[in-house]
Image (cartoon, rainbow, N blue to C red):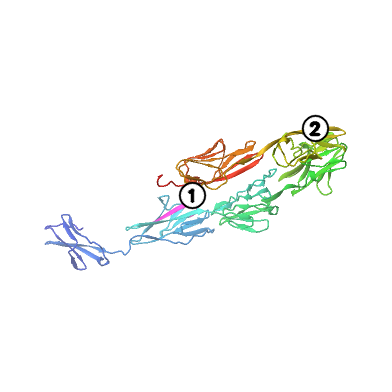
Amino acid sequence: MNHASGLPKPTVRFIRDGLLITEGVTTTRRGSTLTIDDVQNSDAGRYLCVAENVGGATTSSVDVAVARSGVPRIVRTHRAQPHVTAEQVALQVGVGQAMVDRGMRVTMNAAATGTPTPTLSWYRNGKQLRNNSRYEVGSDGSLLIRKVNRRDEGTFEVRAVNSVGRDSDTIGIWFAERPLLSRREGADSVSPIPTSDRIFYPGQSAEVVRGRTVSFVAGASGRPTPHVSWRLPSKRLLRAGQSHGRVSVADNGDLQITNAQPKDSGRYIVYARNVAGTDRVLKRQKTQLTVYDTPRLTTRMTDSVLVDLAATMPSIDNSLIVKPGARVRMGCASDGFPAPDITFEKDGSVLAVGGRTQIANRDSGGQQVIIFDIKPTDEGRYRCLAANRAGFDSSFVDVAVQEGARIVRQMGAIFGNQKSVRVQRGEQFQMTCNATGGSDLTVQWLRYGQIVGNTGRVRQGNGVLRFDRVEGDDSGGYTCVARDGAGQDEDSIELTLGEMPRIEASRQGPLQRPLPASDMSYSAGQTAEVVEGQTCTVALPISGDPRPTVEWTLPNGTVLERGESKGRVTVRDDGSLRIEAVRFGDSGSYRATVSSVMGTDSVDTPVKVVGKSVNEK
């Protein structure tokens, strides 16, 4: 706008390069204005404003330049900035993040394009940085940090601004941290060594049992994230993500050994490295792994018994019966790592050695207890215990010193402490009565006070009563009597007849008849074809003595007993199975199992669910 005054009122004209401009000129009471829309390069030049009247003329001028690109653009680099350990480093805008060392002289360079030339300024946490004792903003747009420290860690922003617009970018600086491993020095001493999988840390002495999984947690920290590697006892180096046989190093640097073996024992060295340095657990810090073998008895007490007088040798349930005055030797041998210690106990306490009781080495390895002139006071349970830090193994012998006849009341001899036994009618069966005594020992079976005579079906000899075929009149009480010149012993047992459990099932295929619309009943063993929505009942007629238990196994594996329910499925007290409001998902095989001390029987009942007919719908 040009404002001119005078009397008379002057006339205003706009001229460029000697030519009068008429377009875009507007005149108001305040003055005259020239407006140029959609400026082009051809509009550049010197513009004159001329005001004149009869009294004279006056002029003013302005030079107009048309800029090709006015918006500022910061010049960026996309090259990664390396870690520099020299005293100074220069960073270029565009690297994003850069790592520096404490105390360095850091220069951040920036350049920008644009017309008019942009002004560059630096900001931190939203505040503009100005020259002071720590920062210097250069005339070329650079930012100098004279001596970088922890307070400078973070993001710096550079802004380029001119009259047309603005642009900005950032540089982040951060400090590298030397790697640090998680270490725990000393031994992880637990006795006995747990048989579970174990976790340890560098610097520990690790002890595990063969076959377990052992892990060493590196726990490496640092910036940037350190690279972890392990040197095995074989001198092989494994890096993160690598494995060798049963040994592997996870991506986070943890070492794992699966199915540990004694050959895995040795020293393991861990390294953590990054650009700031290295940390390692040194040899003197002893990351030592020892894999133990649990003791195993190679010779058990019952394998090593030697008696120099007539005796009953170890039999069922590790029993040894000897006569008074005998010399008895019994011991054991073992292997394991480390070599197990062998100790002997009597009746749960450490065996007292001295006098007639001695401990000696066995010629074939291991140790043995020797009892001279054995007496009734020496009776008891003798145990050999082989133990090391990994565990133990043991065996025992029950020693009895007897005079005169005596029945051996152990499992298998008149069925241990059982006072009754149930037998299936028609089966072959025998009862054995073991006894000790003098050379005149006799063992006989009696019934109602009378010796059981030999018949076609029943006969006895050497303490064994045998039934070729058990019949109903064989039930009742039987007594075993052992006698010799020194005395008598006896024991009794009751023989009861029973019946095998049996399902009186219909083991036929599906019924060949139309499906009714009402609820359906079937017998176990039949194929039940049921219309969706019906209630299906499967009867289970059973027999057996004693009364058998009943279990139904559903297609999904669920087991139900008498009186139990699962959703729409119920097992009744009579053993039958009832499925209410049958669905297609109920299709499958249902197994009924009946059991008692006499045995087991089972039958499968297939259930097939079909859709309703059109009329039913």
Element class at badge 2: strand
Where residue 151 is drawn, which disc sits there? Answer: 1
**Circle nearer the viewer, 2 or 1:** 2
Furthest residue toward top: 449
The magenta stretch spans which residues? 146-160
78 lies left or right of 7: right
Q: Is residue 153 magenta?
A: yes
Taking depth in this image into account, of 543 and 296 the one nearest to the observer is 543
Instruction: Please identify the quarter of the rendering in which residue 69 is found.
Output: bottom left
Q: Which quarter of the figure is the N terminus placed in?
A: bottom left
Q: Measured along the vertical axis of the image, is residue 433 above or below residue 73?
A: above
Q: Using the image, tell me which numbered label, if any, was put on residue 326.
A: none
Front in this rendered view, residue 1 or 464? 464
The residue positioned 63% from the left and 42% from the top of the image is 600
- How many residues crowd mark 2 within 10 Å: few (<14), some (14–19), many (20+)? few
| x and y, in percent, of residue 238 in the image | 62, 57
The secondary structure type at the circle numbered 1 is helix
Q: Which residue is mark 2?
A: 450
Please tell me whether residue 277 is drawn above or below residue 483 in the rendered image: below
Residue 328: name its quadrant: top right
The amino acid type of the residue labelled 2 equals Gln
Callout 1 amino acid: Arg
Classify 10 Å Cα crowding around label 1: few (below 14), some (14-19), many (20 and above). Answer: few
